[in-house]
Amino acid sequence: MGKASNELHATNRWLYIAGIFLLLWALFWSVDELVMYICLGGAAFSVAQYLIKNWDKKIPVQRRHADDGRKKETPVEGFGDLIKKLSQANPADAAVRSKIVTLILGASISFVVLIIVLGVVFGDDDFVQSPNLQRARDFYYNNQYDSAAHYYGLAALEDSDNPDIYVEHGNVLFVTKRYDQALSLYNQALTIDERHSDAQYNKGLVYFEQKRYREAIRITTNILYFDPSYFQAMLLVGDCHYNLNEPDSALRFYEGAYVNNYRSSQLTHMMAYLYDNRGDQKRAIELYRETINLDSANVDVYERLAELLPPQEGNWYRTRAAQLKQGTDW
C-alpha cells in the first residue's frame, strides 16, 4: 500500500512541475522569446512524463478466483505492453485490428489538436511582441504621443517589414496634425503591402484634412474594390463628395455604409437631410425618426419633423423641441 502511494505521488509530481512551468510562462513570456519556449517545452515534457508513468505502471485489480473464491491480483497491461502485444499479434485478428484502428484514430486526433493549439499560440502576431512596440502602444493609448512616436520608430527598426507598425506610427503623427509625416509613413506601409486597407484609409483621412478631396476619394475608393464592406471608407468618400457639393454621390456612399449595417445618429441625420433636400420626404421622415431613436436630444430633428408631419402629430415634436431647448423633461 505504501509503495503504491509513493508511486502515485511520484507520478503526480510531474503535474505539479508542469503547473510550475506554466506559471513561469505566464509571468515571464513577454521578457524573452527563449524563456517562453523553455517554459512551454518544460510543461509539455512534464505532462508527457505524467502520461507515460500512468500508462506504464501496472495497477492491481482484484478479481474473484473461479475455483476457491479467493481474490487474486491481476496486473492491467501498460501502454508499452499493449504495443508489444500488437507487434506480435496476428493482423487478421478482428480484436487486434480494432485496437490498431483505435490507436491510429487517437493519434490522429491528438495530432490535429496539437496543431490547432500551436497555431493559436504561435500564430498570433501580438503573442510575441517586441517591448518597444508594446511601449509605443501603451504611450499612444495614454495620449503620450511624443513618447509613442519614439518607440514606434525603434519598433520599426526591429521589424522593418511590418506595415502595421508604420500605420500605427502614422496614426500618432496624424492625431498631432503632422500630416505630411503621417502621409510618409502610410506610404511606407503601402510599399510593403499595397492593399493594406488601414494604410489606404488613413492616407485618405490625411488628404481629407488637407482638403484634397479628389485625392482622398481616389485612394479610399481603392479599398472598396477589395473590401466592399469597409464602411469607414464609404463614409469618408461620402464626406468628400458632400464637401465637393455633390450630394447625390455622397448619398450613394452613405447608403452603402447604411446597408452594411453601420448606424449612427450622424449618418442617419445626414442621409435624412439629403433625402429631404432631394424632395423625398417619406424617406427623410423615416431617417429623422431613426435619428431620434439613436439620439433623443437632437433638437433640430424634432423641429424638422414638426414641419414635415401633419399638425396633430407634428405638435408633439414641436413641444418636445421646446422642452429640450428649455432643458426640461417630459
Image: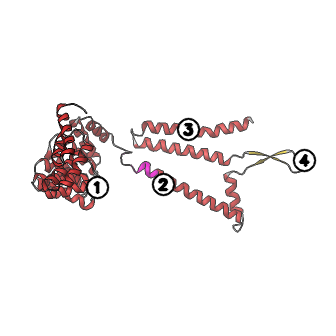
What residue span does the magenta drawing correspond to? Answer: 118-126
Q: Are marks 3 and 4 in contact (CB under 8 Å)?
A: no
Asked whether the viewer can see residue 112, the reply is: yes
* Rendered location of residue 166, percent (x, y): 24, 48
Residue at image position (69%, 63%) is: 96
Residue at image position (47%, 37%) is: 24
Residue 172 is inside the magenta segment: no
Name the N-terminal-most of marks 2 and 4: 4
Q: Closer to the observer: label 4 or label 1?
A: 1
Name the N-terminal-most of marks 3 and 4: 3
Name the residue beneath numbered marker 3. 17
The numbered dot on residue 68 is 4
Measure the alpha-carbon separation of dots 3 and 4: 46 Å
Q: Closer to the observer: label 2 or label 1?
A: 1
Name the N-terminal-most of marks 3 and 2: 3
Indicate the amino acid at tag 1: Asn
Q: Are marks 2 and 4 in contact (CB under 8 Å)?
A: no
* In-image side of 262 versus 95 (left or right): left
Q: Are marks 3 and 2 in contact (CB under 8 Å)?
A: no
Name the residue beneath numbered marker 1. 260
Q: Residues within 10 Å of mark 1 (few under 14, many from 20)?
A: some
